[in-house]
Image: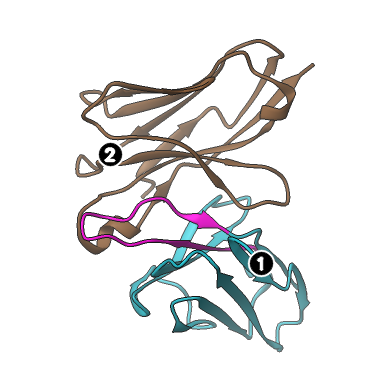
Amino acid sequence: QQQVKQSPQSLIVQKGGISIINCAYENTAFDYFPWYQQFPGKGPALLIAIRPDVSEKKEGRFTISFNKSAKQFSLHIMDSQPGDSATYFCAAAISRGAAGNKLTFGGGTRVLVKP
Amino acid sequence: ETGVTQTPRHLVMGMTNKKSLKCEQHLGHNAMYWYKQSAKKPLELMFVYSLEERVENNSVPSRFSPECPNSSHLFLHLHTLQPEDSALYLCASSQFLAGGGYEQYFGPGTRLTVT
């Protein structure tokens, strides 16, 4: 059973536009929500992460919005650039004990930014 | 070498072969992971080692056998694989903390093809 559902599977946006990726989770015990970015031929790399005690976190052009009651969180990429073209994965984890090592990933979104 | 390295980067093996994938982390972390990445299941956790003890075995077939001889090295021994095992195998490491260690650093992966 997939515990983190991610949409859309792919996204095409014009340079300067906003890319929006959504994730929904089922397990209410999750309390850490990172986003990873993966370029072709590379492993995923942490982009930004949020905890449920805040509703929004911004780092540069990347913003996470979090809705605890709806069990949803999203990544917004503002002023999208061709260099942002990559696959993005949301993830969730329970931060306590040994389970804090285990990330559950969404299915990924392939983003293409057209110049 | 910095970060997380994996060798080989590409591997083609027959179904009767035995091979091993190697991962080395140069970050001083105490937890290491194997993931399988394929078109069907983009990021599937296979094994977790924390403080050199296996703490997670995610219902992985016995034809995959992990080994963690020390906190810096992780191996995945492969034998009698099936064509459906063809995928990108990613290694990751993190610093496990009592309150939960979160950020995982990924290697570039080994692209495995089973013929």
Q: Nearer the viewer, residue A39 or B36?
A: A39
> Which amino acid does the dot numbered 2 rest on?
Glu
Q: Position of residue B67 (x, y in %)?
A: 48, 84
Q: Which chain is brown?
A: A
Look at the image and say whether residue B89 sits in the magenta stretch. yes
For residue B1, the mark is 1
Please tell me whether mark 2 or mark 1 is closer to you in this view: 1
- SS for dot 1: loop
Q: Pinpoint the chain carrying mark 2.
A: A
Q: Nearer the viewer, residue B9 or B57?
A: B9
The span shown in magenta is: B86-106
Q: Is residue B100 above or below residue B46?
A: above
Work out which quarter of the rendered image holds the C terminus of chain A and state it. top right
Look at the image and say whether residue B99 sits in the magenta stretch. yes
Q: Position of residue A81 (x, y in %)?
A: 69, 20
Q: Position of residue A50 (x, y in %)?
A: 34, 33
Q: Position of residue A109 (x, y in %)?
A: 58, 34
Give the left or right position of residue A34, taking residue A62 as reference.
left
Residue sitting at x 54%, y 52%: B41
Residue sitting at x 74%, y 67%: B9
Q: Quadrant of residue B78?
A: bottom right
> Which amino acid does the dot numbered 1 rest on?
Glu
Q: Quadrant of residue A114?
A: top right
How much space separates mark 2 and mark 1, taking CA atoms?
39 Å
Q: Write down the colour of chain B.
A: cyan
Q: Residues within 10 Å of mark 2 (few under 14, many from 20)?
A: few
**Which residue is tagged 2?**
A26
